[in-house]
Image (cartoon, grey):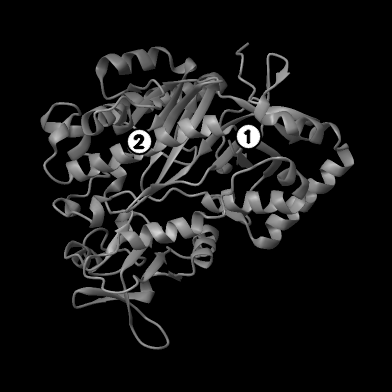
């Protein structure tokens, strides 16, 4: 049986960051715990914190499961994570600036040209464009897992439109409302500054031709999108307009927003839709979600798009394997955070190993997300394994494989009481004039016993994440 690192209790002793929580758990009777859990669910429902699951019948909007037991990091643990996250965000942006320009890392033989220039996430229309401050990915979500007291690994990078930050903020709001005494007893660093930091980051990369306070908007695909709640939440918190493609138009050298008082110029677009739908004149001609001519204005420096079109080539799961090399190549530093060992099925020898060990590995689609398009070997049936075997043989370039990590556990409130459940962490790193992140992130928890899949679409829930002051 695999031994998992319990972040609260290690070798029979409560770890220091969790010391104040032991009494809290011991003194909370089951009926009070159930009452508080129901209260939390009622708050989530009243606020409207739901997510959509596509392809399912009935009401697609679900209440995301919220676990009241917080995850806690010491200030020292967070300090190391913060340095590693910022380092990785710098390297990823340097890579994007390079491959859309001279491609020095490819010329130096550090990453295969095919992996970059034939990648479906590489947008040729962006080549030669240098966005303000040279930043391509403005919100970098780094998914982290822990396997021991000092062992953290990056599971994947999200350089396009990482979601979930609204849950991070609402988790904290609800915990403070339900358990105010915990925040008196523990010196917990705040996360409430995130919307203001995000607004400041977006404003800092306004075009050079923007003479005044930049007008920032959030571009959403609309209310049918699974993350629409987050789009409207962030717009409200930042005090900016939430717009759809039909609300914007191009005239002359600028993008304009339709308002009741006439057109208003838009300087920065925080886009929450995929590249393909941004501009029907440049990408998918059948897109009804984007703005015709947007890319012409972007190319001429009349508007900033955050994150930049084409940023997805940096978070491709095959490119991921080269991020430590990016850190060395661009920054001249050793990576603070390590990758999970990864096999690329595009390589014959590695593919052979993967096919021989499918039952022990986690298989992922190179462009997959949300917990879909993956196989967790040890938890799969022989039939599921054989299906993936045929998929890999048919299109090996589309898959990577990783070992089944012994993900750390954090105590969680479940029906039978308190039990350990596996978790990961997504901090949100903001990149503009400065690189900043709030002390915390979104902890996702696999609420099904024994499950390693934390995605909400696959039955996972969320927790508040505490970083203690030094």
In this view, 379 is above or below 456 = above
Residue displayed at 33% across by 60% down: 204
Count of marks placed on residues: 2
Q: Secondary structure at mark 2?
A: helix
In this view, 404 is above or below 138 = above
Q: Position of residue 407 (x, y in %)?
A: 56, 24
Q: Position of residue 191 (x, y in %)?
A: 56, 50
In this view, 269 is above or below 276 = below
In this view, 394 is above or below 24 = above
- Is 397 displayed left or right of 415 in the figure? left
Q: Secondary structure at mark 1?
A: strand
Q: Position of residue 410 (x, y in %)?
A: 65, 29
- Is 199 displayed left or right of 280 in the figure? right
Q: Report the front residue among 310 and 153.
A: 153
Residue displayed at 28% across by 43% down: 93
Q: Circle 2: is it few (<14), some (14-19), or many (20+) Cα within 10 Å? A: many
Residue displayed at 75% across by 34% down: 414
Q: Which residue is mark 2?
A: 88
Q: Which residue is mark 1?
A: 72
Residue 60 seen: no
């Amino acid at each position: 049986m695999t031994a998992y690192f319990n972040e609260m209790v290690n070798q029979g002793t409560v770890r220091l960051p969790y010391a104040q929580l032991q009494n809290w758990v011991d003194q909370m009777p089951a009926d009070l715990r159930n009452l508080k859990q129901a209260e939390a669910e009622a708050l989530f429902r009243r606020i409207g914190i739901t997510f959509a699951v596509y392809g399912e019948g009935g009401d697609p909007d679900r209440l995301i499961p919220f676990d009241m037991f917080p995850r806690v990091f010491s200030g020292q643990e967070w300090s190391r994570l913060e340095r590693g996250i910022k380092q990785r965000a710098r390297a990823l942006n340097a890579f994007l600036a390079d491959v859309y320009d001279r491609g020095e890392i490819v010329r130096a033989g550090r990453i295969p040209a095919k992996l970059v220039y034939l990648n479906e996430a590489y947008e040729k229309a962006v080549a030669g464009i240098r966005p303000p401050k040279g930043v391509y990915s403005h919100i970098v979500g780094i998914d982290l897992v822990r396997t021991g007291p000092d062992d953290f690994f990056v599971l994947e990078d999200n350089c396009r439109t990482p979601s979930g930050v609204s849950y991070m903020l609402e988790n904290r709001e609800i915990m403070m409302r339900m358990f105010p005494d915990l925040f008196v007893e523990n010196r917990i660093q705040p996360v409430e500054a995130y919307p203001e930091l995000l607004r400041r980051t977006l404003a800092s990369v306004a075009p050079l031709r923007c003479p005044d306070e930049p007008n920032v908007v959030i571009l959403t695909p609309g209310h049918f999108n699974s993350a629409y709640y987050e789009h409207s939440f962030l717009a409200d918190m930042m005090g900016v307009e939430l717009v759809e493609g039909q609300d914007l138009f191009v005239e002359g050298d600028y993008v304009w927003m339709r308002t009741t008082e006439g057109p208003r110029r838009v300087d920065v677009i925080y886009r929450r839709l995929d590249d393909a739908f941004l501009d029907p004149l440049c990408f998918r001609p059948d897109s009804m979600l984007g703005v015709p001519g947007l890319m012409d204005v972007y190319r001429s420096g009349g508007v900033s798009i955050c994150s930049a079109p084409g940023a997805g080539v940096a978070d491709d799961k095959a490119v991921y394997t080269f991020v430590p090399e990016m850190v060395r190549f661009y920054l001249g530093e050793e990576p603070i955070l390590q990758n999970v060992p990864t096999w690329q099925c595009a390589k014959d020898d590695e593919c052979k190993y993967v096919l021989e060990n499918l039952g022990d590995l986690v298989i992922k689609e190179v462009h997959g997300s949300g917990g879909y398009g993956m196989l967790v070997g040890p938890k799969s049936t022989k039939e599921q394994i054989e299906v993936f075997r045929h998929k890999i043989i048919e299109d090996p370039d589309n898959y990577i494989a990783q070992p089944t990590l012994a993900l750390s556990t954090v105590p969680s409130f479940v029906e039978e009481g308190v039990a350990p459940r596996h978790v990961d962490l997504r901090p949100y790193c903001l990149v503009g004039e400065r690189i900043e992140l709030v002390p915390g992130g979104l902890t996702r928890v696999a609420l099904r016993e024994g499950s390693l899949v934390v995605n909400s679409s696959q039955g996972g829930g969320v927790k508040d994440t505490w970083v203690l002051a030094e």
